[in-house]
Image (cartoon, helix red, strand yellow):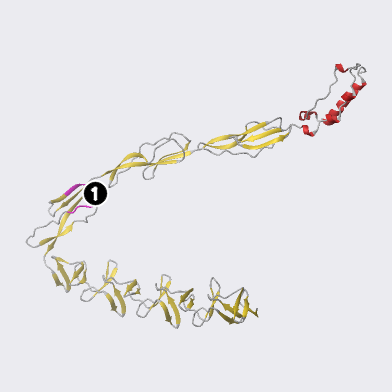
C-alpha cells in the first residue's frame, strides 16, 4: 500500500465515495448506468502513472434519475385482446394485475378463468402474460316424442357434435278412420347442435266400411263396401211394402238414424200401418188417429197445435213438456200471445212456449218471473234495477216515479252515481238513481252544483254560508284561479271561494 501514489489513493477514495453516495442499494445497481474506475496493478505509482487533475471525478459523472431503465408489462386475453399495458415499470416493481377477464361460451363449452400462462412476479424485464381458461362441456338435451307427445326417449348429457341415439320405430294405434305406419321424424336427425325435440310422423291409410240398406223383409236394397269414416251415407230411394188385409203401409223411415259413417252399419226400412184417421172420443177423452195410429205428442191439426200424452189423450190447461210450459185451451188448441189466466198476465210465444225472463214483444221489452207472470214496478235483475210500467213495458229515458225523476238507459238499466246530458245541460243521478237537485256534487274532477231543475249550473256565481264561488262553463267550481266578471278580476282560493276583493 505504501507503494501507491497518494494521488491514486485519493482517486480510489473518491470512487468509493461516489458509489456510496449515489448507489447505496447495491441490489438496485441494475437500475443505473455505472462505470466505476478500478485501480489495477498498472496504477502503481510510477512517474507516468500520476493521476492528473483531469482524472478527477467531476459532477458530470454523477448518476441521475434520467438514467432509469423502463420495462413494459402487457396482459392479454385468450384471443390476444390487450387487457392492460404499462410501459414505465422499473426493475423490481410489483406488477398491477387487471381484473379477471372472461371468455364467451361457444356451442361446445363454457369457460372459467384459470389464471395466467406464467406466474406474475416482480418486474425483471419486458414481459407479456396471457389469460388461461378452463373449458367445461355444455350439456344438451335431445328428446324423441311420439305423435301424441308421449316421450319415447330423452338424453340430457349430449355434447356439441355428438351422434344422436335414435329410439326404435314407434307405433300409433288405428282410430276409426285410419291405420298408421311410421314414416320417420318431423325433421332430419343430425349431430347435436343444441337442445332438440323430434316428433314421430305417420302415414295414414283409410279403413273401409260397409253400409247395407234392407227392406222390412230382409231384401237387400243397396250395399257399399268402400265407405270411409265420416263419409255421408248414400240413402236409396224410399222402398215400399205391399198392403195386406187390414192395413196399407207407408214408408216411415229407417230403424235408426242415418249418420255419417263410423263403422259397418245396416239399416232396415220401417213402415206405418194406416187404419183410421180423425178425432175420436175414448173413455171420455179425446184422441186423434192419423195413418192408422193414435197420435202421441204434438200434432198440427186444423190450423192449430194439440198435445197428446203417451196414451194419446188430448191435453188441456197448463202442460210442462220437456221442461217448458205451454197452455192448452179447453178445446185442446195451443195458446199463443197474451193470456190473462187467474188474474195474471202471461205471454205465450208463437211456438206456444211460456215466456220467462226478458221478452221483446210489440217493440218493447217485458219481464216475466220464473212462473211466467208478467212483472210491474221496480225489478232487481242480475244486480241491476229496472222499472216496469203498469202495462209491463220496460221503462227507458226519464221517468217520474213517486215524485222522483229517474233515468233509464235504452237497455232499461237505471242510471246511478253518474252524470247525464241532454240539450239543456248536465244532470246528476245519485246512488239510488234519483235526480239530484239543489245540492253540491263532487266527482273525480271537482265540485259542481245542481239547481232546483236538476241541471248543473254553469258560468255563474254561487253563494253559500262560506262565501261566493264561481262555476265555469263546464259547471266546475273554479279553484286557485282568476275569474273576470263585469266588475273586474276576482281570485278564487284553493277551496273555491272569492276573497271579496276586485283587482
Q: Give the quadrant of residue 278.
A: bottom left
As helix, strand or loop, the secondary structure at mark 1 comes to loop
- Total marks drawn? 1
Reply above or below: 146 against 469: above
Report the residue at 15% width, 68% height from top: 289
Reply above or below: 334 against 132: below
Q: Which residue is mark 1?
A: 263
The residue closer to the viewer here, 59 or 354, is 59
Q: Is residue 18 magenta?
A: no
Which x, y percent locates residue 37?
84, 23
Q: Give the quadrant of residue 67.
A: top right
Q: Is residue 94 visible?
A: no
Q: Magenta segment, which residues?
A: 223-235
Which x, y percent locates residue 422?
45, 77
Q: Is residue 405 left or right of residue 183?
A: right
Report the residue at 76% width, 30% height from top: 31
Q: Is residue 264 visible?
A: yes
Q: Is residue 81 left or right of residue 349?
A: right
**Quadrant of the rendering where the N terminus is positioned:** top right
Q: Is residue 232 magenta?
A: yes
Q: Is residue 453 left or right of residue 118?
A: left
Which x, y percent locates residue 188?
39, 38
**Quadrant of the rendering where the C terminus is positioned:** bottom right
Q: Residues within 10 Å of mark 1 (few under 14, many from 20)?
A: some
Amino acid at each position: 500500500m505504501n507503494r501507491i501514489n497518494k494521488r491514486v489513493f485519493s482517486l480510489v477514495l473518491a470512487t468509493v465515495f461516489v458509489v456510496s453516495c449515489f448507489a447505496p442499494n447495491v441490489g438496485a445497481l441494475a437500475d443505473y448506468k455505472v462505470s466505476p474506475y478500478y485501480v489495477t496493478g498498472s496504477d502503481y505509482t510510477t512517474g507516468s502513472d500520476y493521476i492528473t487533475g483531469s482524472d478527477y471525478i467531476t459532477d458530470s459523472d454523477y448518476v441521475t434519475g434520467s438514467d432509469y431503465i423502463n420495462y413494459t408489462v402487457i396482459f392479454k386475453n385468450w384471443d390476444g385482446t390487450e387487457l392492460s399495458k404499462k410501459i414505465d415499470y422499473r426493475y423490481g416493481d410489483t406488477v398491477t394485475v387487471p381484473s379477471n377477464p372472461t371468455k364467451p361460451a361457444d356451442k361446445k363449452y363454457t369457460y372459467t378463468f384459470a389464471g395466467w400462462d406464467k406466474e406474475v412476479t416482480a418486474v425483471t424485464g419486458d414481459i407479456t402474460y396471457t389469460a388461461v381458461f378452463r373449458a367445461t362441456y355444455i350439456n344438451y338435451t335431445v328428446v324423441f316424442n311420439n305423435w301424441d307427445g308421449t316421450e319415447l326417449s330423452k338424453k340430457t348429457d349430449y355434447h356439441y357434435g355428438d351422434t344422436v341415439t335414435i329410439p326404435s320405430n314407434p307405433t300409433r294405434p288405428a282410430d276409426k278412420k285410419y291405420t298408421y305406419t311410421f314414416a320417420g321424424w318431423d325433421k332430419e336427425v343430425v349431430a347435436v347442435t343444441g337442445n332438440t325435440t323430434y316428433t314421430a310422423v305417420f302415414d295414414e291409410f283409410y279403413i273401409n266400411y260397409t253400409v247395407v240398406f234392407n227392406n222390412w223383409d230382409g231384401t237387400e236394397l243397396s250395399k257399399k263396401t268402400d265407405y270411409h269414416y265420416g263419409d255421408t251415407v248414400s240413402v236409396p230411394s224410399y222402398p215400399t211394402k205391399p198392403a195386406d188385409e187390414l192395413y196399407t203401409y207407408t214408408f216411415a223411415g229407417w230403424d235408426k238414424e242415418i249418420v255419417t259413417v263410423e263403422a259397418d252399419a245396416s239399416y232396415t226400412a220401417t213402415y206405418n200401418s194406416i187404419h183410421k184417421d180423425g178425432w175420436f172420443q175414448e173413455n171420455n177423452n179425446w184422441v186423434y188417429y192419423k195413418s192408422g195410429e193414435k197420435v202421441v205428442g204434438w200434432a198440427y191439426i186444423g190450423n192449430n197445435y194439440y198435445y197428446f200424452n203417451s196414451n194419446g189423450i188430448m191435453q188441456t190447461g197448463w202442460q210442462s213438456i220437456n221442461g217448458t210450459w205451454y197452455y192448452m185451451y179447453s178445446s185442446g188448441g195451443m195458446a199463443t200471445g197474451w193470456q190473462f189466466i187467474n188474474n195474471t198476465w202471461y205471454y205465450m210465444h208463437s211456438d206456444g212456449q211460456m215466456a220467462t225472463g226478458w221478452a221483446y214483444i210489440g217493440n218493447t221489452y217485458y219481464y216475466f218471473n220464473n212462473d211466467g207472470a208478467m212483472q210491474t214496478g221496480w225489478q232487481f235483475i242480475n244486480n241491476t234495477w229496472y222499472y216496469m210500467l203498469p202495462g209491463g213495458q220496460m221503462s227507458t229515458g226519464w221517468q217520474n216515479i213517486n215524485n222522483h225523476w229517474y233515468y233509464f238507459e235504452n237497455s232499461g238499466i237505471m242510471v246511478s252515481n253518474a252524470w247525464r246530458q241532454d240539450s239543456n245541460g248536465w244532470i246528476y243521478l245519485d246512488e239510488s238513481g234519483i235526480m239530484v237537485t239543489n245540492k253540491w256534487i263532487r266527482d273525480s274532477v271537482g265540485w259542481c252544483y245542481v239547481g232546483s231543475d236538476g241541471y248543473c249550473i254553469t258560468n255563474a256565481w254561487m253563494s253559500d254560508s262560506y262565501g261566493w264561488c264561481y262555476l265555469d262553463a263546464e259547471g266546475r267550481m273554479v279553484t286557485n284561479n282568476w275569474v273576470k266578471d263585469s266588475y273586474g278580476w276576482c281570485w278564487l282560493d284553493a277551496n273555491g271561494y272569492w276573497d271579496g276583493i276586485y283587482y
